[in-house]
Image: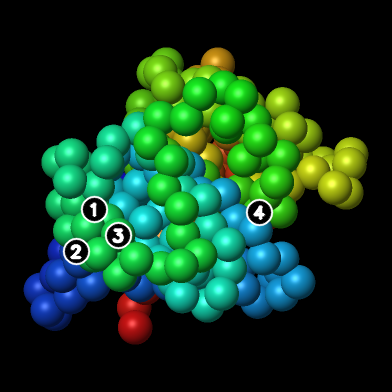
Amino acid sequence: MAEVVALEKRLEAEGTSLYELMSRAGLSVALWIRDMTQRVRTILILCGSGNNGGDGWVIAGFLASWGYSVSLVTARAADALAAEPARTMALEVQAKEHAGLTVYLNPDEEQLAALIEQASVIVDALLGTGFDGSVVKSPYDSWIQAVNAAGAGTPKENESSPLVVAVDVPSGLSAETGKAAPTTVRADTTITMLAYKPGLLMGSSKQYCGSLQLADLAS
């Protein structure tokens, strides 16, 4: 984690703002989804209320602008977010009124299940590097359980189950220690930013991370 902090400080000193880093992070994930799943048109993005969720809003904006059908699930409306630059990003994406983007605020269990069933790709942008691996709080715990229950994650036992892509770190996993909460996303791919976090490299983390991809965000 020290390496990540050092990289962020270096980039900031060079004039790269957190806003720009978030833009690059979201674009890198969106491009990966576009390149790896060219025939997929239906995306579900689960967004937290912090900056990991901000990445999710950026991803949604790019994918919707490219013609994908995107459902974004959030516990807080864009204007109720406190973290920056997540709030600014979310408001900007929402203001563009992409035809392919639908935002769901606190969907009930039945509605979320339907969204998961329809999705070919699910993006986990709930909890980021600040999570300590203890307990995932409501409603994110039930959202993660619903995703995992859909047969997502590795290994694939059902080819019709959705592909799950975690942003930076699977929600429920500590990026620092590799400790997993009782409810942790089982991703097929984790796209982490700037550098590989220590917790992602623990042997026990493979079951949650799936394959690891690095987005260096340097340019």
- Label 3 sits on a secondary structure element that is helix
- Label 2 sits on a secondary structure element that is helix
Q: CA distance from mark 3 to mark 1?
A: 12 Å
- Label 4 sits on a secondary structure element that is strand
Q: CA distance from mark 4 to mark 1?
A: 22 Å
Please identify the quadrant where the C terminus is shown: bottom left
Q: Is residue 39 visible?
A: yes
Residue at the disc numbered 4: 121
Q: CA distance from mark 4 to mark 2?
A: 27 Å
Q: Amino acid at mark 4?
A: Val
Residue at the disc numbered 2: 18
- Label 1 sits on a secondary structure element that is helix
Circle 3 or circle 4, nearest the eye: 3
Contact between labelled residues 2 and 4, with CB atoms less than 8 Å apart: no
Question: Which image quarter: residue 98?
Answer: bottom left
Q: Amino acid at mark 2?
A: Leu
Q: Earlier in the sequence, mark 4 or mark 1?
A: 1
- For the rendered model, the colour scheme is rainbow
Q: Amino acid at mark 1?
A: Ala
Q: Which mark is residue 94?
A: 3
Q: CA distance from mark 2 to mark 1?
A: 10 Å
Q: Earlier in the sequence, mark 3 or mark 2?
A: 2
